Image: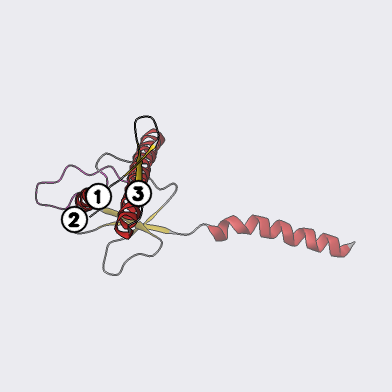
Amino acid sequence: MAFKFILKSLAMFAACALPMLASAQVYTWKDANGRTHFADQPPVGTDAKPVRGNIVPPEPEAPRASGSAPSAKASGPRTWEDQDRDYKQRKTEQAEADAKAKKEKDAKAEKDKYCSSLRSNLAALERGGRMSKPNAKGEPDFLSENQMKSEADRIRSQIASDCK
């Protein structure tokens, strides 16, 4: 029973002493440019004063003259609406870039397929043998040697112009 009383007393003491231990001293001072600074340790060689109560942030600085360094954010913190709008804009731009990349990739694949078909047709013509083309009725028309040579020349010129 006495042990529980001592344990409860220590817990109460710790609960009361904890806020006093957690509160740290805060110091404020102004630098050579007139800016107000806050820290838990005062810098050496400055007229730092301890702050009591709540810390109030300093007033925003006046606009700087041209040629001096700009402030971190002249317009203040961004609202969640601004951040959301920027996020949606970035997502839209990314989606457009992805769609463009996919379209370019598909066009390249189609061109590669076309060029591969031209090369295989040229190889078949150069190999020789009986070659045919379908006529208007869908029936095969066999090509003569001259027709095969002119067709091979036509395919070579297509490859040279389209498949670089």
> Which element is circle 2 on?
loop
Q: Is residue 115 left or right of residue 156?
A: right
Which residue does the image show at 35% across and 64% down from the upper left?
A: 42
Where, quadrant-wise, is the C terminus in this rendering?
bottom left
Q: Which mark is residue 155?
A: 1
N-term mark: 3 or 2: 2
- Residue kind at label 2, given as amino acid type: Asn
- Viewer-proximal residue among 105 and 46: 105
- Viewer-proximal residue among 90 and 158: 158
CA neighbours of label 2 inside 10 A, class few (<14), some (14 to 19), many (20+): few
Residue 101 sits above or below residue 30 on the image: above
Q: Which mark is residue 131?
A: 3
Mark 3 or mark 2, whichever is nearer to me: 3
Q: Looking at the picture, how far across and down is residue 94, in whole percent?
A: 36, 43
Mark 1 or mark 3, whichever is nearer to me: 3
CA neighbours of label 3 inside 10 A, class few (<14), some (14 to 19), many (20+): some
CA neighbours of label 1 inside 10 A, class few (<14), some (14 to 19), many (20+): some
Per the model, the C-alpha gap separating discs 1 and 2 is: 77 Å
> Which element is circle 3 on?
loop
Where, quadrant-wise, is the N terminus in this rendering?
bottom right
Which residue does the image show at 24% across and 42% down from the upper left?
A: 74
Q: Looking at the picture, how far across and down is residue 155, in whole percent?
A: 25, 50
N-term mark: 1 or 3: 3
- Residue kind at label 3, given as amino acid type: Met
Q: Is residue 62 magenta?
A: yes
First to last magenta residue range: 58-73
Per the model, the C-alpha gap separating discs 3 and 2 is: 89 Å
* Residue with the mark numbered 2: 33
Per the model, the C-alpha gap separating discs 1 and 3 is: 15 Å
Q: Looking at the picture, how far across and down is residue 116, in whole percent?
A: 34, 53
Residue 140 sits above or below residue 136 on the image: below
- Viewer-proximal residue among 141 and 46: 141
